[in-house]
Image (spheres, helix red, strand yellow):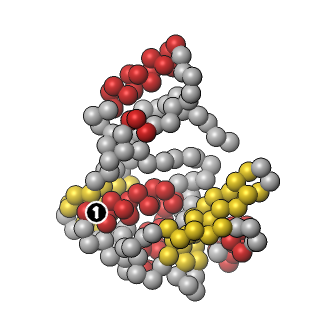
Amino acid sequence: MGQAGDAEQAAVVTRGGSQLTPVPALFLKTWKIFQVDYRQGAHPVRFFVASSGSKATLLTGRPKAFTLMTAEDGANVAGPATATTLARLYVETTRPAEEPAYVVESVDEIRFRPGLSGDDAARKGAIVKRYRPVVRTPEGVAQGAGFAVTAFTVSKRGSVKENTTTLVKDLPVPITL
């Protein structure tokens, strides 16, 4: 990682007090994905890395690194359920650290700001009503030579093609800095 320009993250991985947690990715043959957590003063640091044993790469903020990893690994995406797992893991591990994101399976899982009132509360109610039938658990389906998973197309070798649609701009949700 250090040779690839990610010396700061490489130092965190090897620093005492860092916690490396394996992330299940059964579609991978030789590579492994790790969640790295470290507390820097009052601020927690979290990012994701992948390792083949002899090589490591930063995934956080790097969607292309995820696709290169699955290609180098020869990942086996044998069915829609595996494609769904891969797509979810892709979203969770490659999002930029400064842009909090999370996968939701229903509008009830959207973390709106607490104590909304007035126009914000009305907007929340309208969003929930409009998107309740739209937002649902990601589900993969066979499509051509690969799989379609909600907003992602996943090939049998694990490459991901993003096809994202923003449903609502400026949701009244907490902002984290």
Q: Which residue in the rendered view is the most extreme toward the right? A: 41
Q: Is residue 100 left or right of residue 11?
A: left
Q: Position of residue 152 (x, y in %)?
A: 34, 55
Q: Nearer the viewer, residue 93 or 37?
A: 37
- Residue 170 seen in this snapshot: no
Residue located 66% across and 67% down the image: 19
Q: Which residue shows up at 31% across the image and 66% down it?
A: 82
User: Does residue 66 appear in the picture of this structure?
Assistant: yes
- Residue shown at 32%/47% (left/top)? 137
Image coordinates of residue 100 in percent, x first then y, are: 56, 46
Query: Where does the image place residue 16, in percent across and percent down from the top left?
Result: 76, 71
Q: Quarter holding the N terminus?
A: bottom right
Residue 35: which quarter of the image?
Answer: bottom right
Where, by quadrant of the figure, is residue 128 drawn? top left
Q: Is residue 149 left or right of residue 1?
A: left
Q: Is residue 132 above or below residue 162?
A: above
Q: Outermost residue toward the top?
A: 118
Query: Regarding mark 1 in the picture, which secondary structure is present there?
Result: helix
Residue 5 location, quadrant: bottom right
Q: Amino acid at mark 1?
A: Ala
Q: Which residue does the numbered mark 1 point to in the structure image?
A: 81
| Residue at far bottom of view | 54
Q: Is residue 88 left or right of residue 47?
A: left
Q: List x then y, in percent, for residue 3.
A: 68, 78
In the image, is 154 to the left or to the right of 51? left
In this rendering, the count of numbered labels is 1
Q: Kindly identify the residue that appears in the image at 20 percent across and 61 percent down.
A: 142
User: Mark 1 packing: few (<14 Cα in 10 Å), some, or many (20+)?
Assistant: some
Where's the C terminus, which quadrant?
top right
